[in-house]
Image (cartoon, rainbow, N blue to C red):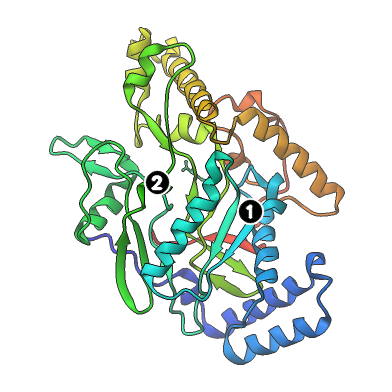
């Protein structure tokens, strides 16, 4: 079966009246944020009036930039929020065709990669129209590796992307069949069927993984991309939804070393690494997985650093997050936090985020990045 992402979103199943009432409330709240205190009160009234009359309203680039920064600050699952003020905006609201939106994605990747000094960015395309029609990136991120299901049930590549790879194939894309084929970016607009665009090679910076002590490690031929650019979340600001809003920060090493390359339903590299290390894998109690995982994570941090691509380790980011949460408190704000997401997948007890509670997550808080129930 073709895993075509349905076009409806949860927001569209909400009755029109309650949806409008909610948007009006979000708009009113937004223009009362201290970060927008420099705008005159007339701006809030005109936005509300336009929203009530037409179902949407035109925001300024400044409002979107502030809104996107607040969305980052409000997002309970992000451990990197200390840097929320540094987010840069690429305003692509006037771009219409899938082809031109793809070009904007390439520009985003170029600016975000920034020669390795990864820069936090968001590109904002056309807002969802009052009639619900929208443009969006269908792919989960701008850079993702394909996964091919083999005849014997094994997967070549990233097993998390078997469905989207199959979908791209049905659209006519053909990958080389290696473990690290970059998937094309899939884009949907109101006026065209979903289209795919091959990422220009030179824009997809990658890091080959080697180990500081184990010479054989480079022979595993592992690599990962420099920039995590999430593209399947809606940006919601002041009652307006931007479905086309790819954004990126920089990687925490564990995202790659302790999840992407080691989860059994991703690249599942720990058994091979343990073998190469000569570990006793006969029983879980030998902690062979743990030992292999630490070496893989050391290799990731070492390789990104050597390649000059910005990355942060889980100890440093956890410390930064605790400082951020304290600062937010001192500023009189809550810092809604999903404890299970901001703690690292390895060695969590060695980081300060493990040993304390935070304000509970608040899914209703806006502006925010909101998961689509598609893709
Ligand atoms: N965990 C995702 C990945 O491994 C990326 C999510 C966003 N991460 C970030 N550091 N901004 O690709």
Using residue 189 as the reference point, say whether residue 24 is left or right of it.
right
Q: Disc 1 vs disc 2: which is toward the camera?
A: 2
Using residue 119 as the reference point, say whether residue 294 is left or right of it.
left
Task: Please tell me whether mark 1 sits on a helix, a strand or a loop.
Answer: loop
Look at the picture and state if 164 lies above or below 222.
Answer: below
Residue name at image x 49 percent, y 26 percent? 303
Mark 2 C-beta to ligand 1 under 8 Å: no
Q: Position of residue 269 (x, y in %)?
A: 35, 25
Task: Please tell me whether mark 2 sits on a helix, a strand or a loop.
Answer: helix
Residue name at image x 51 percent, y 84 percent? 130
Q: Which residue is mark 1?
A: 75
Q: Quadrant of residue 156?
A: top left
C-alpha span from label 1 to label 2: 32 Å
Which comes before the other along the chain, label 1 or label 2? 1
Using residue 331 as the reference point, say whether residue 339 is left or right of it.
left
- Residue 202 disc label: 2
Q: Position of residue 9 (x, y in %)?
A: 44, 70
């Amino acid at each position: 079966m073709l895993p075509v992402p349905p076009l409806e979103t949860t927001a569209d199943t909400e009755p029109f009246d309650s949806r409008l009432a909610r948007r009006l409330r979000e708009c009113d709240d937004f223009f009362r944020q201290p970060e927008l205190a420099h705008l005159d009160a007339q701006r809030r009234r005109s936005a509300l009036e336009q929203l009530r009359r037409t179902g949407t309203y035109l925001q300024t680039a400044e409002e979107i930039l502030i809104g996107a920064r607040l969305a980052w600050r409000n997002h309970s699952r992000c451990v990197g929020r200390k840097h929320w003020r540094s987010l840069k905006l690429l305003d692509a609201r006037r771009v219409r065709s899938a082809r031109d939106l793809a070009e904007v994605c390439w520009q985003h990747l170029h600016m975000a990669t920034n020669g390795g000094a990864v820069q936090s960015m968001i590109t904002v395309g056309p807002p969802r129209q009052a009639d619900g029609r929208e443009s969006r990136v269908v792919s989960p991120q701008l850079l993702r590796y394909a996964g091919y299901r083999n005849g014997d049930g094994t997967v070549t590549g990233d097993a998390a992307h078997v469905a989207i790879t199959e979908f791209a194939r049905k659209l006519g894309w053909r990958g080389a069949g290696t473990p690290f084929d970059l998937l094309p970016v899939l884009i949907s607009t109101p006026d065209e069927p979903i289209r795919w665009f091959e990422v220009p090679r030179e824009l997809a910076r990658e890091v080959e993984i080697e180990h500081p002590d184990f010479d054989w490690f480079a022979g595993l031929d592992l690599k990962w991309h420099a920039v995590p650019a999430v593209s399947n979340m809606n940006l919601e600001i002041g009652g307006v939804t931007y479905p086309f809003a790819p954004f990126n920060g920089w990687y925490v090493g564990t995202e790659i070393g302790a999840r992407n390359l080691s989860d059994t339903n991703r690249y599942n590299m720990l058994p091979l690494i343990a073998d190469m290390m000569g570990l006793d894998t006969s029983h879980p109690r030998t902690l062979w997985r743990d030992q292999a995982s630490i070496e893989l994570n050391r290799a990731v941090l070492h390789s990104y650093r050597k390649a000059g691509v910005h990355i942060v380790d889980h100890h440093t980011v956890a410390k930064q997050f605790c400082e951020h949460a304290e600062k937010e408190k001192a500023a009189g704000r809550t810092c809604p936090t999903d404890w299970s997401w901001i703690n690292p997948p390895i060695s969590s007890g060695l980081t300060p985020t493990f040993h304390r509670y935070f304000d509970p997550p608040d899914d209703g808080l806006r502006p925010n990045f909101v998961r689509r129930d598609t893709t």
